Amino acid sequence: MEKVFVAQQVANKLIATEHAVDGALAEAAELMSAMISARKDVNASLVFADDCQVKLMDAIKALSEARTAMVGVHHELYEAKLRLGIRTKMGFEDKKIDGVEQPTLRQAV
């Protein structure tokens, strides 16, 4: 299989993973908002379920660290692609993975 096609497969998985981490981070933030609103709606004190909020903040921090790590993975894979001698241009065609449009790589001439 040509290197550019192998690189495309990896790029598709990378982008899908980046979207998944961003989605999880957004969902966790929305959960935090919902928890705060729910506490207010039932007139509970600030200390009610505080341990849950602390755990959720830990999870949000971990997701943020995962996002930063994925940015690092993206950079490293870009460098690896160049070391393999793959010169590509990004093209945006109607290609979707899990409902998310994916850029496609074309070999530069």
Image (cartoon, rainbow, N blue to C red):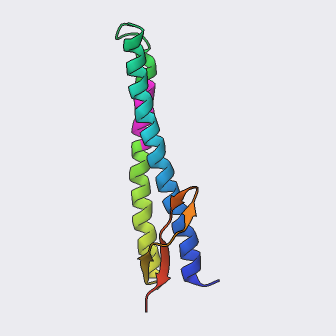
- Quick one: which residue is furthest to the right in this view? 1
Tell me residue 57's x, y (percent): 40, 30
Determine if the magenta segment contains residue 56. Answer: yes
User: Is 100 left or right of 26, judged from the image as shown?
Assistant: right
Predominant SS along the magenta part: helix
Is 69 placed above or below 47 here?
below
In the rendered image of this protein, does residue 105 appear above or below residue 96?
A: below
Q: Residue furthest front?
A: 94
Instruction: Confirm whether residue 1 shows in the render.
Output: yes
For residue 84, say whether it is visible: no
Q: In terms of depth relative to the viewer, which is nearer, 108 or 75?
A: 108
Where, quadrant-wise, is the N terminus in this rendering?
A: bottom right
Residue 68 in the image: x percent, y percent? 38, 51
- Residue 43 in percent (x, y) is at 38, 7
Q: Which quadrant of the view contains residue 42?
A: top left
Residue that appears at 39% across and 44% down: 64
Residue at 49 percent across and 77 percent down: it is 105
Tell me the quarter of the picture where residue 59 sits: top left
Total number of numbered labels? 0
In the image, what residue occupies the spot 45% across and 29% down?
A: 31
Percent x, y for residue 80?
46, 74
- As drawn, 57 above or below 21: above
Q: Residue furthest left?
A: 46
Report which quarter residue 76 is drawn in.
bottom left
| Quadrant assignment for the C terminus | bottom left
Magenta residue span: 55-63
Residue 49 colored magenta?
no
